[in-house]
Amino acid sequence: MLDRLKVLAERYEKLGELLSDPDVVSDPARLRSYAKEQAELEDIYQAYREYRTVVTQLEDAKALLEDKIDDELREMAKAEVAELTDKKEKLEERIRVLLLPKDPNDGKNVIMEIRGAAGGEEANLFAADLYRMYVRYAERQGWRTEVLDSHVSDLGGYKEIVFRIIGPDVYRKLKYESGAHRVQRVPVTESGGRIHTSTSTVLVMPEAEEVEVEILDKDIRVDTFCASGPGGQSVNTTKSAVRITHIPTGIVVTCQDGKSQNDNKAKAMQVLRARILEKKRREEEERLAGERREKIGTGDRSERIRTYNFPQSRVTDHRIGLTLHRLDAVLAGEIDEIINALILAEQTEMLKKETPA
């Protein structure tokens, strides 16, 4: 571990030198690349520096105990050794986590799709609740959101909404949200006061760069049509809405929330690239089935991951057995505790695999 840390620390310092090199400063692409790489190493570098300091202090404190010193100083030295030993162990644990393999998509923006699934109109209304939850969470993180496509239901829910979240480390925090989200409550359409169970599904995809997914013109068919509002009625007379079919995969993307046909086409291509990348990722996971994250789930849209129980004001994440009794706060975007617990669960699983039996 220490040898690897030393190599990474040397690389961090080398990057600092490169970022001051006039040749690099005059090359925006290299400057961005080196700055990004150094930023990714920042936490490891600082942890390594702190670890070296603690190890030196611990050696000095132990050496003091070997000397002939009075009882009071000996007790102080013993206390310091105990404190520094504990600090060293905690730093080693933190460093092990920092050295875990990184998901190459963690730093990317995401494209999210939320759909009303089982439960009719109530599922569509809950899809709208989930959309607002993620928008509020994004606001709390300082991220931006942008709706790419939406299909509003008769009562103001969403049959489907596709949106983009832009900011640092978005995928790292939101990738665990893919799956089936179940709601238990009395629907607005229920006159008898009975509690119903409905489901909305969430899919989180890392945004794909053009260089990652090449889409040839000959591989797509582009259709245009008039955008529609709730109930299917036309909201304009110009064919600004766009439907793109990717012929090799059969993936179909529509976009109608942009200001123009060109805007909708550009947004639809963003979604298409993300879906193709997601398809490739899933195919790769299936080939490496043994490497899947067993603890936090597969990320499949159909996997039930969480229940929102309104009568009990309860939220339960079934993958890690976490239950919170503050539903209103969660729906207001306060989902940090859930996301941090999921990140910790994945890190724990990875550490188990990294540690020899």
Image: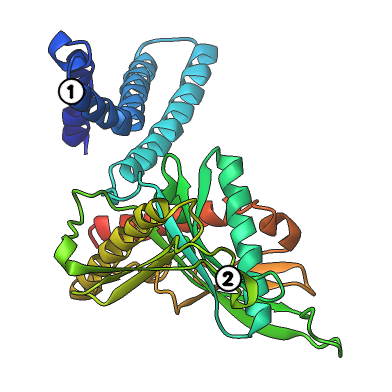
Vertical comparison of 249 with 106: above or below: below
Instruction: Inspect this view and state whether residue 323 appears.
Output: no
In the depicted structure, whether residue 299 falls above or below residue 332? below
Identify which amino acid the numbered label 1 is placed on. Answer: Glu
Residue drawn at (23%, 16%), measured in percent from left and top? Answer: 16
Name the residue nearer the viewer: 266 or 74. Answer: 266
Circles 1, 2 touching at the beta carbon (< 8 Å): no
Residue 189 lies in quadrant: bottom right
Quadrant in which the N terminus is drawn? top left
- Residue 121, which numbered label? none
The residue that label 1 is drawn on is 10
Q: Report x, y in % for residue 180.
A: 51, 75
| Tally of marks | 2
Q: Quadrant of residue 178?
A: bottom left
Question: Is residue 91 at least partly visible in the picture?
Answer: yes
Q: Dot 2 corresponds to which residue? A: 234
Q: Position of residue 140 (x, y in %)?
A: 61, 42
Q: Residues within 10 Å of mark 1 (few under 14, many from 20)?
A: few
* Label 2: few (<14), some (14–19) or many (≥20) C-alpha neighbours in 10 Å: few
Q: As rendered, which of 267 and 131 lies closer to the eye?
A: 267
Q: Look at 39% across and 38% down and name the residue there.
A: 89
